[in-house]
Image (cartoon, rainbow, N blue to C red):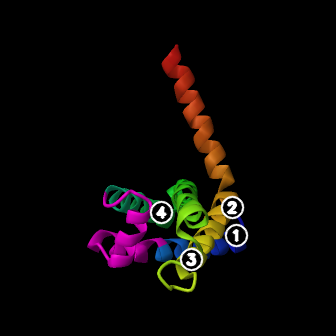
Amino acid sequence: MSKTNVTISWILRIIAAVILGQTLFFKFTGAEESKYIFSVLGMEPAGRYGSGVAELIAVVLLLMPRTAALGGLLGLGVISGALMAHLTKLGIEVQGDGGLLFYLAVAVFVCCAGIVWLHKDQLVALLARFRKSSTMAGN
């Protein structure tokens, strides 16, 4: 990866990790807005804690260079669920936030998509190793 791409990768990873990381406080402390969101989705409290754990894992993976691609994929998965919740049940604006949570989710989605794109070689190598080990285990 070029020096420019490494820099872009770090910027995207830090932005996604900061946004995902700051939401953990609200999920794990049972902030009213988090409770409201997951109640509307019919997933309170298990969904709140489960998504918080998945986001925490994504943050850790994003901040480690060897696992950045996996962090990007996990981040895309988690945030895709959040975006679908906004678009189907919650709405863009939640409890008068002016759409802030939705727009932060869009930012995380864009960052994670960029991370996956920049680290696609890492994912291809991981898939190749997985296929090789699967083939060897089958013999």
Per the image, label 4 sits on a secondary structure element best described as: loop
- Residue 113 position in % (x across, y down): 66, 62
Which circle's residue, 1 or 4, is located before the other in the chain?
1
- Residue 18 position in % (x across, y down): 48, 77
The residue to which callout 2 is attached is: 118
Amino acid type indicated by mark 1: Asn
Which circle's residue, 3 or 4, is located before the other in the chain?
4
Residues rendered magenta in the picture: 20-45
Amino acid type indicated by mark 3: Leu
How far is mark 1 from mark 2, CA to CA? 7 Å
Residue 64's tag is: 4
Looking at the image, which residue is at 41% across and 77% down? 22
Which circle's residue, 2 or 4, is located before the other in the chain?
4
Circles 1 and 2 in contact, beta carbons < 8 Å: yes
How far is mark 1 from mark 4, CA to CA? 16 Å
Indicate which label's residue lies in the foreground, 3 or 4.
3
Amino acid type indicated by mark 4: Met
Residue 22's tag is: none
Indicate which label's residue lies in the foreground, 2 or 3.
3
Label 2: few (<14), some or many (≥20) within 10 Å? Answer: some
Per the image, label 2 sits on a secondary structure element best described as: helix
- Residue 71 versus residue 52: which sits nearer the camera? 52
How far is mark 3 from mark 4, CA to CA? 22 Å
Residue 31 colored in magenta in the image: yes
Secondary structure mainly formed by the magenta segment: helix
Label 1: few (<14), some or many (≥20) within 10 Å? Answer: few
The residue to which callout 3 is attached is: 104
Looking at the image, which residue is at 38% across and 71% down? 36
Which circle's residue, 2 or 3, is located before the other in the chain?
3
The residue to which callout 1 is attached is: 5
Residue 136 vertical position relative to residue 110 in the rendered view, above or below: above
How far is mark 3 from mark 1, CA to CA? 23 Å
